[in-house]
Image: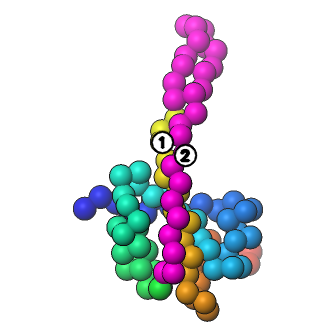
Amino acid sequence: MIEIIKKPIVTEKAMRNQEQGQYVFEVDPRSNKIQIKHAVEKMFEVNIISIRTARVKGKIKSRFTRKGIMRGKTALRKKAFITLKQGQSIDVVGGAAGAE
């Protein structure tokens, strides 16, 4: 089985949507909504209401080096927007709160 959930996406917009119970994850581009739902429910033990997915195309990048212009492309990514049942949450930030 492929590794479906790669990492949570922690941006200002994603953190703002967490208040409404919506979380954003970067997932494997080959996975479908059913696989994503089973993986998230198994990993975090939550109930999912809906899943929306978006494919993000890779950007063309170039840089100037001593040997000339190097051109390349970033990889295709897929994001999953997951809405949870009312009253449930996922701790995507994790770690210990507070500094020593």
Question: Does 72 appear in magenta?
Answer: yes
Question: Does 59 appear in magenta?
Answer: yes
Which amino acid lies under the numbered mark 2 shown in the image of this protein? Val
Residue at point 60% right, 21% down?
62
Residue 12 shown left or right of residue 86 in the figure: right
Residue at point 73% right, 62% down?
13
| Region of the chain picked out in magenta, as a range | 48-73
Task: Please name the residue that numbered disc 1 is placed on.
Answer: 76
Residue at point 58% right, 8% down?
68
Question: For residue 16, which quarter of the picture?
Answer: bottom right
- Within 10 Å of the Cα at label 2, are there few (<14), some (14-19), or many (20+) other Cα atoms? few
Residue 31 shown left or right of residue 97 in the figure: left
Which amino acid lies under the numbered mark 1 shown in the image of this protein? Leu
Q: Between residue 89 and residue 49, name the one nearer to us.
A: 49
> Which residue is at the far bottom?
87
Q: Principal SS element in the magenta part?
A: strand
